[in-house]
Image (tube, grey):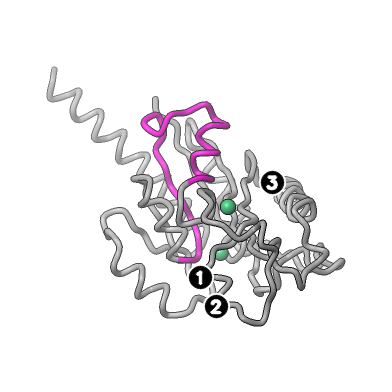
Amino acid sequence: MKKTLICLDRDGTLIYDKKYHLGRTDDWKSKIKILPTVIEGLRLLRTLPNVAIYIITNQPGVAIREFPLLTLDRAHEVNRYILTEIAKMGGQIDGYFLCPHTNLQYVKKKTNYHFDEKMVCECECEKPKSGMVFDALKSERLTREEAILYVIGDRSSDVETALNINGRGILIPFENEPRHFEKIKKLDQANVYIARDFLDAAQFIVDQNKSKKYTHQNTNRRKV
Ligand SMILES: [Mg+2]
Ligand SMILES: [Zn+2]
């Protein structure tokens, strides 16, 4: 039986995203607000028979010199804390992967910031590249073929991360700029779903899982 691997974006998907680069101030814990239906959705996902759930998050703020408190250690601390808080509320996430890098286009765009050159690179982990999904597969000791893959996020780059590795991408819009919808329209619609909220995204995955089972049973019946 294949395992369902679900990779979740963090900011704007699990928690409110106010573009403040969580962890750059000492009061970061007070800024974390879990979004509505996230815990309910995570509980529903756990009803799948064979499932693993990971956060995959781009944290380019680590590379920004103007945020000296947002070190790589701090970025890990923030993720660990979010996992613990979600667990306390009844949501179970197996782990997280973070990309602390940033690329040249981002640097050029953010002219008001200065960047740590060591962190500016063309890494394999920054979404929409699939490095962090491969990390999640590895930590589950799965090959790509052994997993049914979903990525849930609030940006087209999250959906593209899924499509880049032949998975399904689910967009949950969160105060998104229209350009995300424009980008989404250009992607392979057969593997894209736009959800109302986190619970709807979870329900979509559970329904997909059920319909796969039906297909399987029907095939068997025909053979008999
Ligand atoms: Mg996001
Ligand atoms: Zn990276």
Q: Position of residue 153 (x, y in %)?
A: 50, 60
Q: Is mark 1 within 8 Å of ligand 2?
A: no
Q: Quadrant of ligand 1?
A: bottom right
Q: Position of residue 211 (x, y in %)?
A: 30, 41
Q: In this view, does 82 lie above or below 18?
A: above
Q: In this view, does 192 lie to the left or right of 215?
A: right
In-front residue for pair 112/118: 118
In-front residue for pair 103/118: 118
Could you give the CA–CA distance between mark 3 and mark 2, rounded to whole angstroms? 39 Å
| 149 is within the stretch colored magenta | yes
**In the image, what residue type sits under mark 1?**
Gln
**In the image, what residue type sits under mark 2?**
Lys
Mark 3 or 2, which is nearer the eye? 2
Could you give the CA–CA distance between mark 2 and mark 1, rounded to whole angstroms? 6 Å
SS for dot 2: helix
Mark seen at residue 105: 1
Q: In this view, does 147 lie above or below 152?
A: above
Circles 3 and 2: CB atoms closer than 8 Å:
no
Q: Is mark 3 within 8 Å of ligand 1?
A: no
Could you give the CA–CA distance between mark 3 and mark 1, rounded to whole angstroms? 39 Å
Circles 2 and 1: CB atoms closer than 8 Å:
yes
Tell me the magenta residue range.
131-155
Residue placed under numbered mark 3 in the picture: 90
Question: What residue is at 46 percent from the left and 52 percent from the top?
Answer: 129
Q: Position of residue 72 (x, y in %)?
A: 74, 53
Question: What residue is at 66 percent from the left and 82 percent from the top?
Answer: 112
**In the image, what residue type sits under mark 3?**
Gly
SS for dot 3: loop
